[in-house]
Image: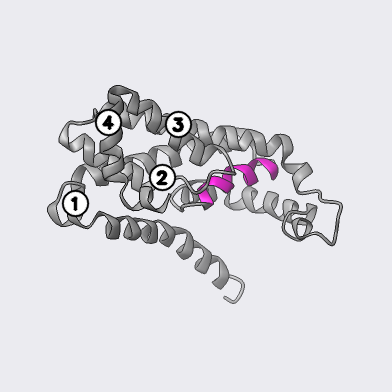
Amino acid sequence: MLDILLHSDKKLLELVASYGSWVYGILFAIVFAETGFVVTPFLPGDSLLFATGALCATGALRTPAALGLLTLAAFTGNAVNYSVGRAIGPRVFSATDRSALSHRLLNQQHLERAHSFFEHYGGKAVILGRFVPIVRTFVPFVAGAAAMRPPAFVLYNAIGAGAWVCLCLGAGLLFGNVPIVKDNFSLVTIGIVFVSILPMLVEYLRHRRRPAA
């Protein structure tokens, strides 16, 4: 999996050569699964979109098709994750074994705090969380479990999905075939992950400072 993450450009090119137009379906499935299932946060997201943009720039993939399908995959994946959170989240957070680690991490008090958080900062959480690996897999589930209002979630989910895919894929279109980027794709991938964490880190630090002010 680490090899796929660091060399997603080469792996994606191999998929295009092997499966042709079916690669769009494969890309859709990966992005959908990464955002739609809480058990698959390890799938590549940012680096895959960047590599897709790079291949779009060479003509190996069609930009409108990739942009539309992957935005749809990101949106529907989060929507499914949110729905699952609304359906089973309250039961997951209502652990009865107080000695279990699951109770310490997922209990009713935490669920109530999450509900309050999404009522006040839900939009930012859904949008910014989209850009943070692993976090983006859990945000919609917790939003559903915390009963974030569906109309609000749909709106911010659409904004986040569009912004994430456009930014990452667009960056690949612009910079993916620049020689220094192409020759050091592994380092670029690590940089993408680091940059992805920055918005959430900044928001976290701002939130920490408010009580002391």
The residue furthest bottom is 212
List x then y, in percent, for residue 100.
80, 59
Question: Is 175 on the left or on the right of 111, as rendered?
Answer: left
Question: Circle 3 is placed at which residue position?
Answer: 29
In front: 205, or 104?
104
Question: Circle 4 is placed at which residue position?
Answer: 16
Question: Is 203 on the left or on the right of 142, as rendered?
Answer: left
Element carrying mark 1: helix
Question: Circle 1 is placed at which residue position?
Answer: 182
Q: Is there CB contact under 8 Å for labels 1 and 2?
A: no
Report how far apart the C-alphas of labels 3 and 1 lie in the structure: 25 Å
N-terminal-most mark, 4 or 1: 4
Element carrying mark 3: helix
Question: Circle 2 is placed at which residue position?
Answer: 45
Residue 24 lies within the magenta run: no
N-terminal-most mark, 4 or 2: 4
Q: Is there CB contact under 8 Å for labels 4 and 1?
A: no
Question: Would you call the spot at circle 3 few (<14 residues within 10 Å), some (14-19), or many (20 or more)?
Answer: some
N-terminal-most mark, 3 or 4: 4
The amino acid pointed to by label 4 is: Val
Question: Is 174 on the left or on the right of 148, as rendered?
Answer: left
The residue furthest front is 18
From the image, give the main secondary structure of the stretch colored magenta.
Answer: helix
List x then y, in percent, for residue 84.
66, 35
Question: Would you call the spot at circle 1 few (<14 residues within 10 Å), some (14-19), or many (20 or more)?
Answer: some
Question: Would you call the spot at circle 2 few (<14 residues within 10 Å), some (14-19), or many (20 or more)?
Answer: many
Seen at 39% across and 26% down, the residue is: 25
Part of the protein shown in magenta: 135-146
Element carrying mark 4: helix
In front: 38, or 131?
38
Element carrying mark 2: loop
The amino acid pointed to by label 1 is: Lys
